[in-house]
Amino acid sequence: MPAPHLEPVTDRSAWRGEDLARVPQEWTYRMSVAEIAELEAAVAAVKGRAIEGLGRDDFRMPALDASLARIADEVDFGRGFCLVRGFPAGRHSAEECALVAWAVASRLGRPITQNAAGDLVGHVRDLGRKLGEKNVRGYDSTSELRFHVDECDHSVLMCLRTAKSGGVSAVVSSAQVFNQLLATRPDVLPKLFEGYIFSLMGEERPGVGPVSDHLIPIFSWFANRMSCRYTINTVLQAAQYGAPISDQEREILFSVLEAAKTPGLALTFAQEPGDIQLLNCLSTLHHRTSYEDFAEPERKRHLLRIWLAAHRPRPLAPEFEQRFNAGWSYRRGIPVRARESVAAQ
């Protein structure tokens, strides 16, 4: 069992939301008119080509690249997130906005599959499903999404349309959540570093079991950096496949959520159309409130999501990285079993 780390994390990844709320210029970046024009021209130059075949060199945008290089440093090695603002999504199609998100994402990492259908650009919108039902992914519902991570190094989320009400975002430093637990609940840390059996959410490869073949740590201290993998539903749903947890283990699992909800820890904000949220999923947890949508299909809340394996990946402990059994690193993406997309286009 990995030994728990029992010293506070003090690097830039350990921030408090109440501090950042006072200095929004430190975690937001508003693109200039010239940078937006450069990005629009770069997208126009590749429109019509298959998005999965496009890489960094296909998007020429030297001015914006200088800004994105600084942002990438912050996402990779600093506080772990940035909100890029200013793109006029309303005057562009969903296809063009996907290319915008792809162009920005290409500066941080390599897109990886985010479901068993092999989707590289996901559509975050309500499909009438309910979180908690077997193998349901929360982004297909209007439900509240508790603090969690995505199964990637970085997550890129671009807002096309907002909901009628709700759907507010929050980000919290997972290192600061660890610090909170160290100060108030050190008794839970051994189990959180040991880990849990995770459900593969119906996305396992043929011939591979439906749950992880080893305990996956919630917190992992490796190469002097704290990483976190926290997804309540994947642990709770493992019980449906014969891997139940005790009442004590459940309480320990939820202690992370309670720590994340400590007043002052999280940063709350509303994404606007055109905003691009960049998250390091090893050093932040994110949350979304439930929402009420518009009745008209063309007005419904809609975001685009890209998962990335970082260009500059941090070293990770094998038991933390090998998420999908038999040595399958999460950085390879979710194993593909069906080529057709499950997301409506």
Image (spheres, rainbow, N blue to C red):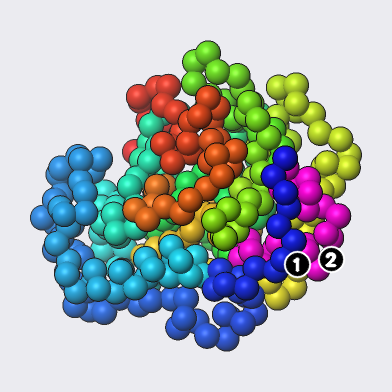
The residue that disc 1 covers is 180
x and y, in percent, of residue 96 in the image = 24, 53
Is 38 displayed left or right of 250 in the figure?
left
- Category of crowding for the residue at label 2, using alpha-carbon neighbours closer than 10 angstroms: few (below 14), some (14–19), many (at least 20): few
Can you say whether 18 is above or below 92 in the image? Answer: below
Q: Residue furthest top?
A: 207
Question: Element type at marker 1?
Answer: helix
Asked if disc 2 and disc 1 are in contact, CB closer than 8 Å, the reply is: yes
Instruction: Identify the magenta region.
Output: 172-194
Residue at image position (56%, 44%) is 317
Residue at image position (39%, 48%) is 308
Q: Residue furthest left?
A: 45
Does the magenta-highlighted stretch encompass residue 142?
no
Main SS class of the magenta portion in the image: helix
Quarter of the image for the N terminus: give it. Answer: top right
Q: In the rendered structure, which amino acid carries the disc numbered 2? A: Thr
Quarter of the image for the C terminus: give it. Answer: top left
- Nearest to the observer: residue 339 or residue 246: 246
- Nearest to the observer: residue 152 or residue 116: 152
The residue that disc 2 covers is 184
Is 183 displayed left or right of 161 in the figure?
right
x and y, in percent, of residue 221 in the image = 62, 54
